Image (cartoon, helix red, strand yellow):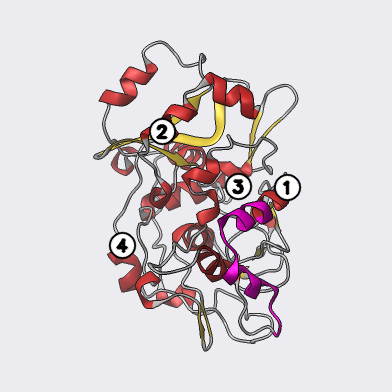
Amino acid sequence: MKSLVIRIASTAVVGVLAGLIPIMGGAQSSKVQKVWDEEALAEWATPVVGLNVRPGHFTEKEYYSAPVDTLRTYPMYYPGREPEGYWEMLQKVGPLPLIEADKLKTDMDWIEAGQRIFEELDVPNMRKWDPKLIEELRSAEVHQQMKTPMAPDGTLFAVRWIPTTKGLAVGLTNCGGCHIRYLENGRQVNGAPANVRGPNQIGKIGFLAASVLPLEGDTPGMAYYRNYGVPWIKDDIHEQLKKMERPELGRLFGSVIRYGTFPRWGGSVYYTTKIPDLIGFKDRRWIDHTATHQHRDLGDLMRYAALVSYAEAYEFGPHKILADPQRRIDWRASDEALYALAF
């Protein structure tokens, strides 16, 4: 949803926190809901401020034509904190599924699977295989210079290792990067706004690439404008992004990165988005701080996680933000993975 009003970045919500379905000990008989459903999408979003039209969406056919990518990921440890043999294991284990839906039989199975999705799912189009970047992330000297914080268990926040068919990649966590908080006693709280930053190398992995990847021929600034521009607003402040080069963009984004807010794609780098507390989500009728979408049932939660992770079409009445080559879904999570997340 494009608007100059601030929106909350509910990048993903875990149902064990939301409490949408009671925990029971018996077999799970509920049918996995369909994520991208034309009927459910029709009036799901609220009209856009200044346009009075609902945003457009990809069709079911377009959505389900995208390849499923839900690979298992592994924590990245601060140098010297890796368990013995851990690095060698990562080189050999190969790509594995993050969850195995056919083995989920009980409510507790689905809840545990949802927690894994929340904590471990990465963003496939931001994976990097760059040996120099990997070397930096494994260097104690680099982390000491950058004063990289680490979690109580010795891991680095918001980054993961992903064994793939192309070798070992480094990537970013999808949900947990914004919605995991650590208390003073070291306890991890899923769903609360993050209060630990990841390593400085996050920018090289793709933190600022947002959800609209550059088109061949785009200037650096134009790529960012596609994520933030509001063309129906007179004198849109984001127009100036088009002419910015990487150093200026780096300074701009560096000046707004702080705990509690996020320059979320579809929002604004000048009016940063509040990161919400997702605990108790079951009692909320609307999604986002400005009620951009209805929260009618568990399916809406699944749809929203998909929408903000990889499936925003950026169509607002006559305004088509994406160029034709960009109007595609590069990957998607399985319906089962999103059902587990929302359960």
Magenta residue check for 232: no
Q: Is residue 334 left or right of residue 116?
A: left
Q: Which mark is residue 66?
A: 4
94, 333: nearer the viewer: 94
Nearest to N terminus: mark 4 or mark 2:
4
The answer to whether mark 2 and mark 1 are in CB contact below 8 A is no
Q: Write the start and end of the magenta stretch as one range.
A: 234-252
What residue do we see at 50% from left, 74% from top?
314
Nearest to N terminus: mark 2 or mark 1:
2
Q: Which mark is residue 260?
A: 1
Q: Which residue is mark 3?
A: 19
Give the percent coordinates (x, y) of residue 276: 69, 52
| Marks 1 and 4, how far apart at CA | 32 Å
Mark 1 or 3: in front is: 1
Nearest to N terminus: mark 2 or mark 3:
3
| Marks 4 and 2, how far apart at CA | 31 Å
Q: Which mark is residue 132?
A: 2
The answer to whether mark 1 and mark 3 are in CB contact below 8 A is no
The answer to whether mark 4 and mark 2 are in CB contact below 8 A is no
Magenta residue check for 250: yes
